[in-house]
Amino acid sequence: MYGLAIAQSGNIISGDITIAAGAGGTVDVSGRLDASNRATGKTGGKIKIKGETIAVHDATLDASGPPGGGTMSLDGG
């Protein structure tokens, strides 16, 4: 499962979520990014946020899973 959001607000639910701004761009994250996996024996998904400037406020980022979580990366400037 893949997810893509542009100028999205509210909830984003997907196994793999990537939000990226172009060179010199700003990413502003709020709301809920859910890459969790509740299936027995499955780990969580991936959340990647890339941009020159990254702001995260009033946000919930979830990449959890029963045996272990997935990965999250915030890659700024």
Image (tube, helix red, strand yellow):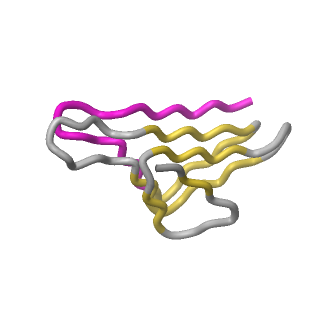
- Residue at 63% x, 47% y: name it: 19
Q: In which quarter of the image is the C terminus?
A: top right
| Above-or-below relation of 59 to 64 | below
Percent x, y of residue 52? 76, 36
Asked whether, in this view, residue 41 is left or right of residue 53, the answer is left
Residue, far right: 23
Displayed quadrant of residue 33: bottom left
Residue, far bottom: 10
Question: Magenta segment range?
Answer: 60-77
Q: How many labels does the image show?
A: 0
Asked whether, in this view, residue 28 is left or right of residue 24, the answer is left
Percent x, y of residue 47? 49, 41
- Residue at 52% x, 32% y: name it: 73
Asked whether, in this view, residue 12 is left or right of residue 45, the answer is right
Percent x, y of residue 3? 55, 53
Percent x, y of residue 23? 85, 37
